[in-house]
Image (cartoon, coloured by chain):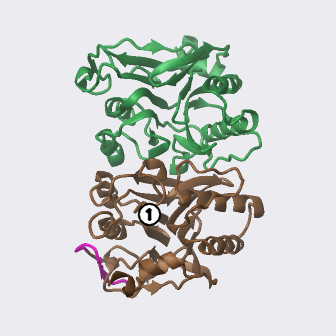
Chain colours: A green, B brown
Amino acid sequence: MCELLGMSANTPTDLCFSFTGLTRRGGETGPHKDGWGVAFYEGKGVRMFHDPEPCATSPIADFVSKLPIKSKNAICHIRQANVGNINLANTHPFTRELWGRYWVFAHNGQLPNFSRRTGVYEAVGDTDSEELFCDIMNNVRQNLPRDAMPEQLAEKLVSLAKEYAQQGVFNCLLSNGDWLFTFCSTKLASITRRAPFGPACLSDVEVEIDFAAETTPKDVVSIIATEPLTNDEQWDIYERGEWKLWQEGEVIASGKVDVPEHKKEAEMVAPDPSLHD
Amino acid sequence: MCELLGMSANTPTDLCFSFTGLTRRGGETGPHKDGWGVAFYEGKGVRMFHDPEPCATSPIADFVSKLPIKSKNAICHIRQANVGNINLANTHPFTRELWGRYWVFAHNGQLPNFSRRTGVYEAVGDTDSEELFCDIMNNVRQNLPRDAMPEQLAEKLVSLAKEYAQQGVFNCLLSNGDWLFTFCSTKLASITRRAPFGPACLSDVEVEIDFAAETTPKDVVSIIATEPLTNDEQWDIYERGEWKLWQEGEVIASGKVDVPEHKKEAEMVAPDPSLHD
């Protein structure tokens, strides 16, 4: 399994604090040592950093964690490989261009044997995650008009996510730089920070921040992550099958669909004691 | 105008030396201060760094110039904007996926008013260069089989390059990670380094390297750049209309097509003294 981190904000904001917490899980406080990547939107452009090295010890991750890149939408992923080798082509997030925008995707979960339907987008690496991304992109291109509203897109994305989540574990972050779509099949949490801002402490490393010193009263910044990154704030935990569409730091649409619990996942999350006694 | 830098090698090689020379031209020894970008292939994956800041003073460029990323194919670009604003979306090199590979493109020149023909690939930013790239990608996708050999691809690329060079200045580098296609409409130079390796000095900054200490006798590394980057080696200067297809550090196909000299370009390169007296 992997860890996801997304940001949606109404003003360009750096991700240094959350990124610092997450990267500790990449081989230090967590087992996600098989590479990492991050995408920062700046306008319609996107700045990507990818590295197949463990992010807890990657010089590039260390450099990026100190780089105050300001973004309204960002997606980050640290990987614990299960499908596909550890190499650059298999390192999330993945990007494709559609309708003159870059779409960025990261996935946490596993859909063994998934293969995408026909379409113009093809995977470069050999992960199930990239196949899923290409399947989404082909479906969106084939079935929606290019001027589709975010809510119309969300409806399509939810129906695809539901289909995937019936075949395996599918937590995802997807953005085109304008909005951020999030879907929880097993694990996802979010927090929205707005005035009055206060301090916060990371769970994975001794770092504290005072958001009041770094923000203006109008700022709204939401962070979405596999698990809460701070230990002194109240995070919202997504329910199974819950999805939220974020824009400018706010939820603009949300809902919940039925998603089955998979046998394998159930074993992993809450093992049957009889098997282990 | 901009500056291009490409590398084709038969063994993963770092670009630190040439990149250090080129980046001096990004606002220090040259006027190309409107952003820079570089793409390094690692297998089928590609690692990209983009920055709309002048590369001579960019912390990311400084970091990348010391990062020994090993690649067999790399493309770098520093920009002096003429078409399109200075922003991330307009920063070369550009990438699209085709047939399960990432294709990367950088352009030096100007084709005012160029607009691509219809196809699945669309520009995200508003440069003529990205429109040209999308036109190439649409043409290749529509007119060639997915198992086309590099030589067959080159034939198509040359005919497109010739067409573009008739409308304006079109020097380019294009790669899919397997080969590197280069076309010269006005300015391009190359050098192939192989055993016995010797020392070399950069033209733009006082840096010397002894390649013999960093290579094995089997290594073949070719560098392609707008202008020679060293002052003590013999570079091959491309002629107008000349193209070369590189693979594993060697030229595997080459040729020359007729390309007209443009009035504007002639004025820029060799101004009529009567106009300036």
Q: Which residue is mark 1?
A: B76
- A66 or B25, nearer to the observer: B25
Seen in the picture, residue A171 relative to B25 is either above or below; the reply is above
Chain at numbered mark 1: B
Seen in the picture, residue A41 relative to B2 is either above or below; the reply is above
The quarter holding residue A163 reads top right
The boundaries of the magenta stretch are: B197-207
Within 10 Å of the Cα at label 1, are there few (<14), some (14-19), or many (20+) other Cα atoms? many
**Residue A158 position within the rendered picture, expressed as x and y whole percent measured from the top left:** 66, 23
Left/right placement of residue B114 relative to residue A7 reads: right
- A107 or A84, nearer to the observer: A107
Residue A54 in view in this figure: yes
Residue at horizontal 76%, vertical 39%?
A: A117
From the image, give the main secondary structure of the stretch colored magenta. loop
Seen in the picture, residue B4 relative to A46 is either above or below; the reply is below
The quarter holding residue B68 reads bottom left
- Element class at badge 1: strand
Which amino acid is tagged 1?
Answer: Cys
Does residue B140 show up magenta in the picture? Answer: no
**Residue B87 position within the rendered picture, expressed as x and y whole percent measured from the top left:** 42, 49
Residue at horizontal 49%, vertical 36%?
A: A80
Seen in the picture, residue B3 relative to A37 is either above or below; the reply is below
Residue at horizontal 55%, vertical 71%?
A: B170
- Marker count (numbered): 1
The quarter holding residue B199 reads bottom left
